[in-house]
Image (cartoon, rainbow, N blue to C red):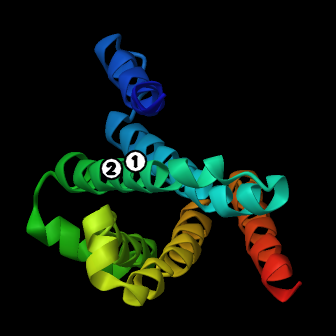
Amino acid sequence: MRAVFHAASLLPLLWLVYLVATGQIGADPAERIVRYLGLTGACFLWACLTMTPLRLLSGRSVWISYRRGLGLWAFFYLSIHLLSFIVMWAGLDVQILLEEVTERPYVYLGLFGWLLMVPLAFTSTRSARRRLGKSWIKLHRLIYPVALLGLAHMLWIAKLDYLQVSIFGGLLFMLFFCRWFYRKN
């Protein structure tokens, strides 16, 4: 089952490769690729955040077995989102990168959110969980500020079309509410 899960998680990347290879990526390939990878990473992040509420609502712990994989796939897609921004958008030009970070705060928010994900990805193993003990749970609560930073990042980029951001924001609110409700009761 894990092999199917990981193969399915590669499908968005394979679809992107197909679009590029067939010339269907659009007039501004750099922007389209960066946005596609960011959206894909956000979808995996939100799916990861959904696993605990699904466990709480269904009473079945099977959902939790997918949480780590979804989180790692989110980190993977958001890492290549960042890498494609650096390589394709900025052309590896440090001056352009510095301008983007200083002139567009959404870049800073996205970078900060990604940096918060780094320790989560590197401590996602069972051995790291054992070594860190209760600190592991505290560390992995960074996923909530990561999601909020991701939402702010999307909101700032949205320009005039806020439908996608509204959907992500509504889902995040529902996920947070579900966690709060079950902890309270």
Q: Residue furthest right?
A: 185
Q: Residue 101 in the image: x percent, y percent?
A: 30, 76
Q: Quadrant of residue 29?
A: top left
Query: What residue do we see at 56% from left, 56% from top?
Result: 48
Tell me: residue 106, above or below residue 93.
below
- For the question of whether residue 151 can be seen, the reply is yes
Question: Helix or strand or loop: what does disc 2 sit on?
Answer: helix
The amino acid type, in three-letter code, at marker 1 is: Trp
At label 2, the amino acid type is: Phe
Please name the residue shown 78% across and 83% down the image. Answer: 183
Q: Which mark is residue 95?
A: none
The correct choice, above or below, for 33 with respect to 57 in the image is above
Question: In the rendered image, which residue does mark 2 sit on?
Answer: 76
Q: In the rendered view, would you say 181 is above or below 161?
A: below
Q: Quadrant of residue 170?
A: bottom right
- Find numbered disc 1 in the image and state the secondary structure of the residue it sits on: helix
Q: Is residue 174 above or below residue 26?
A: below
Question: In this rendering, would 40 be left or right of 93?
Answer: right
> Can you say which quadrant of the picture contains the C terminus?
bottom right
Please give the residue where the numbered disc 1 appears in the rendered image. 73
On the image, the x and y values in percent for residue 116 come to 36, 77
Going 49% across and 44% down the picture, which residue do you hit? 40
For the residue carrying disc 2, how many other residues have a C-alpha within 10 Å: few (<14), some (14-19), or many (20+)? Answer: some
Tags 1 and 2 in contact by the CB under 8 Å rule? yes
Residue visible at 72% across and 66% down in the picture = 169
52 vs 89, left or right, is right
Q: Nearer the viewer, residue 185 or 140?
A: 185
Residue closer to the observer: 116 or 168: 116
